[in-house]
């Protein structure tokens, strides 16, 4: 999907399987009835908000991958990161692959607006099978928070590796640090709300993973999993997004949307009545202590990227 969201990414989008928002992007992980055309502006807004982080990740990749002919964005969502890949690799053909056709339409429109449509293509279908539609192997395959929406992550990494050219690079964005946007003590309610929201989100995420078709539990040691896929792990680096208070309107709207999703799932995540009442206040635009109005709202998080190379 394009996640959260937080990833909330970016991502492959299909029922029960894909993405954003999360962030952490806080993911909304029940995708069976999502209207992707309706969700697209939110996904684009979130990815644009995180662009400073993603741009630094792309610059790091550009130091490792020189002159790629084909770059694939596996689970691209509406194509914001596809555009950043096009910027980072100006001589490359870029292919955005995703399960949601409406999001790929947005990706094509973005390519037209930003001037790289002549070297941009899309593939619609489920990961990893959709990659069989590539004309030739990828020099760089980028997967941002799409892998964890696939039931068998080990098998998916092996499939991704099989679509790399010799010497090609697989880069996956998974994990990092949970997003922070609230002070520990809000001035009302029990301090530490965001830590409890993290715990609730982890429970939801675990249930999402367990419910995926063909779900396989695996230790998420990404360098080890990349090695098991027949690749040589070449790097791990985390990238910070630090938007201090006071937040601009777009960031404030993102926080409100993230909290709204968390509040919607609060009934079955173990949050007590006190925390739910605090969330209601935080989301009430008429409350001076809400995220719509408080001056101490910030956004701080980190995403981790792992790279590996096909050595043969």
Image (cartoon, grey):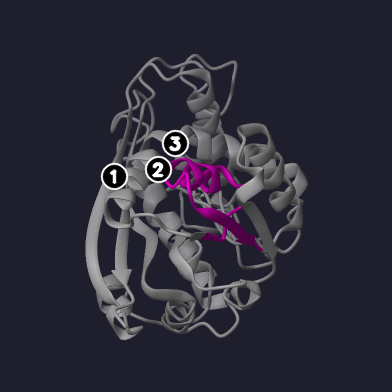
Side of 60 relative to 188 (left or right): left
Check disc 2 and report its element: helix, strand or loop.
helix
Gap in Å between the C-alphas at discs 1 and 2?
8 Å
Q: Nearer the viewer, residue 178 or 183?
A: 178
Residue 116's disc is none
- Mark 1 or 3, nearer chain start: 3
Q: Are marks 1 and 2 in contact (CB under 8 Å)?
A: yes
Q: Is residue 99 above or below residue 157?
A: above
Q: Are marks 2 and 3 in contact (CB under 8 Å)?
A: yes
Left or right: residue 170 versus residue 177 is: right
Q: Whole-percent x and y of residue 171? A: 37, 62
**Can the viewer see residue 51 in this picture?**
yes
Start-end of magenta stretch: 72-98
Left or right of residue 35: residue 31: left
77 magenta-colored: yes
Judge by depth and name the residue closer to the eye, 187 or 81: 81
Q: Is residue 155 above or below residue 37?
A: below
Q: Which mark, residue 54?
A: 2
Residue at mark 3:
51
Q: Is residue 185 above or below residue 78?
A: above
What residue lies at 55% left-to-right and 54% top-to-bottom? Answer: 94
Cα separation, mark 2 vs mark 3, equals 5 Å
- Using the rendered view, name the quadrant where residue 174 is placed: bottom left
Q: Is residue 220 above or below residue 56?
A: below
Mark 3 Cα within 10 Å, few/some/many (few <14, many 20+)? some
Q: Quadrant of the N terminus?
A: bottom right
Label 1, label 3: how many angstroms apart (C-alpha)? 11 Å
Q: How many marks are shown on the rendered structure?
A: 3
Q: Which mark is residue 239?
A: 1
């Amino acid at each position: 999907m394009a996640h959260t969201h937080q990833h909330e990414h970016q991502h492959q989008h299909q029922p029960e399987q894909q993405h954003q928002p999360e962030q952490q992007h806080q993911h909304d992980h029940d995708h069976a009835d999502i209207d992707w055309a309706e969700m697209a502006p939110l996904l684009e807004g979130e990815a644009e908000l995180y662009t400073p982080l993603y741009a630094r990740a792309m610059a790091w990749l550009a130091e490792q991958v020189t002159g790629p002919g084909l770059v694939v964005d596996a689970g691209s969502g509406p194509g914001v990161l596809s555009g950043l890949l096009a910027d980072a690799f100006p001589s490359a053909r870029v292919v955005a692959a995703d399960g949601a056709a409406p999001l790929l339409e947005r990706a094509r429109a973005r390519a037209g607006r930003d001037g790289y449509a002549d070297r941009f293509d899309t593939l619609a279908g489920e990961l990893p099978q959709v990659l069989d539609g590539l004309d030739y192997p990828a020099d760089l395959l980028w997967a941002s928070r799409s892998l964890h929406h696939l039931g068998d992550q080990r098998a998916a990494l092996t499939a991704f590796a099989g679509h790399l050219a010799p010497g090609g690079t697989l880069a996956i964005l998974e994990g990092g640090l949970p997003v922070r946007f609230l002070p520990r003590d809000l001035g009302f309610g029990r301090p530490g709300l965001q830590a409890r929201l993290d715990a609730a989100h982890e429970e939801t995420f675990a249930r999402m993973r367990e419910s995926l078709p063909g779900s396989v539990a695996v230790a998420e040691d990404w360098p080890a999993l990349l090695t098991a896929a027949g690749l040589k792990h070449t790097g791990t680096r985390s990238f910070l997004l630090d938007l201090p208070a006071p937040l601009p309107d777009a960031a404030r709207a993102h926080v409100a949307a993230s909290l709204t999703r968390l509040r919607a799932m609060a009934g079955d995540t173990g949050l007590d009545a006190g925390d739910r009442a605090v969330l209601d206040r935080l989301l009430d635009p008429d409350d001076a202590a809400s995220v719509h109005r408080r001056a101490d709202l910030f956004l701080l998080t980190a995403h981790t990227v792992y790279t590996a190379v096909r050595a043969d």
